[in-house]
Image (cartoon, grey):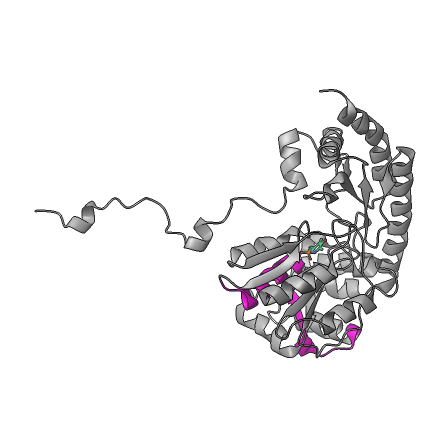
């Protein structure tokens, strides 16, 4: 029997990706320290690269998580009710103004999905926290990236780009990652008032607990222009539990219910976060120990003739005093010595390496490795 002409058309094997996905790079925003350990064939001696809190979770959160682990056969509460109620009470907002999700990273993906379709304008900074851009690209956003100015996100330039492109979404983190700098609450409130109508500003406040007084704008949970993100990954020491929240006016906050993964937040994380939220003394202790660690990192930098940047976070960006290639060689030499650190991706921020505040033992390893790494980066090749 003669075959039908359509049967002879060469169909490429494999899944028929959407045009959008077919056009995305294969890259991931982060190469994990575990990946690096596998390729080094050895564990890191000091884990100072991911802004985790090596001071750990609150003992109360650990107990709550251990207890919840025994009940892991049950799904978690899909409404995250108890945690949401506690967060709402803590911030004096309504439960309908709180969204709980799988880390800020997960919430950023949902936010972008809510506001972005192919061609939608989105504005961020060149060199800012990469997960936002990762999600924006994944939904086909028309991205505008403005350069940092004096090692801070340039609020005026973000605003101008938002106006010029009629952006649906503007993103920045305050305090900032990767530089550790900050804007004041008053400066951010002034920006908000000049935002074009219909533009949503997402402020990523992953480092809120470490920020000096006067950094975080007052929460107005009815302000439809704003969504704020907080996480249990940093000061609460629960990065591996994947839990965070957003606060926004009800029309935006409740829209997350249309797209979120309803059982995405696991019950161990729910229990841990609830206990962590109530242990203010632990957070205060972590903030104190982090401040001491940042002083020590700054001292180590000075000892090596380098300039630490003032930090409003739980890490210190150290200016290595030359160009990106020198900082990259320094970082690679640190990694070879078992010190996990990261650095900004774009010039001129990439003259810095970024070192997370950690316990004295880890910083001692860094102090020992840094002069050797600098010498190696300096050696003629
Ligand atoms: C660490 C970090 C995050 C990640 O938060 P998760 O809740 O762990 O997903 C988000 N934003 C910034 C700016 C960060 O530095």
In this rendering, position of residue 70 left or right of residue 3: right
| Residue 61 seen in the figure | yes
Q: Position of residue 99 (x, y in %)?
A: 65, 70
Q: Nearer the viewer, residue 111 or 102?
A: 111
At a point 68% along the width and 61% down the height, the residue shown is 158
Q: Position of residue 234 (x, y in %)?
A: 76, 55
Q: Nearer the viewer, residue 290 or 131?
A: 131
Q: In which quarter of the image is residue 255?
A: bottom right
| Residue 132 seen in the figure | no
Q: Position of residue 252 (x, y in %)?
A: 62, 74
In this rendering, position of residue 318 left or right of residue 100: right
At a point 86% along the width and 34% down the height, the residue shown is 367
Q: Which residue lies furthest to the top in this view?
A: 380
In this rendering, position of residue 168 left or right of residue 228: left
Q: Quadrant of ligand 1?
A: bottom right
At a point 81% along the width and 36% down the height, the residue shown is 321
Q: In which quarter of the image is residue 270?
A: bottom right
Q: Is the magenta stretch mostly helix, strand or loop?
A: helix
Q: Position of residue 250 (x, y in %)?
A: 64, 78
The reply to whether the magenta stretch includes residue 102 is: yes
- Numbered-mark total: 0
First to last magenta residue range: 90-117
Q: Which residue lies furthest to the left in this view?
A: 1
Q: In which quarter of the image is the C terminus?
A: top right
Q: Which of 79 and 268 is in front in this view?
A: 79
Q: Nearer the viewer, residue 99 or 69?
A: 99
The reply to whether the magenta stretch includes residue 96 is: yes
Q: Quadrant of residue 12?
A: top left
At a point 71% along the width and 44% down the height, the residue shown is 344
């Amino acid at each position: 029997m003669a075959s039908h002409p359509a049967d002879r058309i060469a169909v490429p094997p494999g899944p028929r990706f959407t045009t959008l996905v077919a056009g995305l790079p294969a890259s991931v925003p982060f190469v994990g320290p575990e990946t690096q350990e596998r390729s080094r064939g050895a564990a890191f001696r000091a884990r100072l690269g991911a802004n985790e809190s090596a001071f750990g979770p609150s003992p109360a959160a650990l107990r709550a998580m251990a207890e919840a682990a025994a009940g892991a056969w049950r799904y978690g509460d899909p409404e995250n009710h108890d945690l949401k109620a506690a967060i709402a009470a803590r911030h004096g907002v309504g439960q309908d103004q709180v969204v709980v999700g799988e880390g800020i990273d997960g919430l950023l993906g949902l936010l972008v999905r809510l506001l972005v379709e192919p061609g939608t304008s989105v504005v961020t900074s060149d060199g800012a926290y990469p997960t936002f851009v990762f999600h924006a690209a994944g939904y086909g956003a028309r991205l505008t990236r403005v350069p940092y100015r004096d090692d801070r996100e340039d609020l005026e330039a973000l605003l101008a780009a938002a106006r010029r492109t009629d952006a649906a979404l503007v993103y920045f983190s305050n305090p900032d990652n990767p530089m550790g700098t900050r804007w004041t609450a008053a400066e951010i409130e002034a920006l908000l008032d000049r935002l074009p109508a219909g533009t949503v500003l997402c402020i990523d406040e992953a480092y809120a607990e470490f920020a000096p007084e006067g950094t975080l704008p007052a929460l107005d949970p009815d302000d439809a222009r704003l969504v704020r993100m907080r996480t249990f990954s940093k000061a609460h020491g629960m990065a591996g539990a994947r839990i965070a929240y957003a606060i926004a006016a009800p029309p935006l906050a409740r829209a997350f219910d249309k797209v979120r993964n309803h059982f995405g937040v696991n019950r161990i994380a729910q229990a841990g976060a609830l206990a962590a939220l109530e242990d203010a003394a632990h957070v205060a202790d972590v903030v104190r120990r982090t401040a001491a660690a940042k002083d020590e990192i700054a001292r180590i930098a000075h000892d090596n003739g380098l300039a630490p940047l003032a930090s409003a976070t739980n890490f210190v960006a150290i200016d290595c005093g030359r160009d990106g290639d020198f900082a990259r060689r320094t970082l690679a030499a640190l990694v070879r010595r078992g010190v996990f650190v990261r650095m900004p991706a774009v010039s001129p921020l990439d003259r810095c390496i970024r070192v997370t505040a950690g316990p004295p033992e880890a910083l001692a390893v860094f102090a020992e490795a840094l002069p050797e790494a600098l010498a190696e980066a300096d050696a003629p090749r």
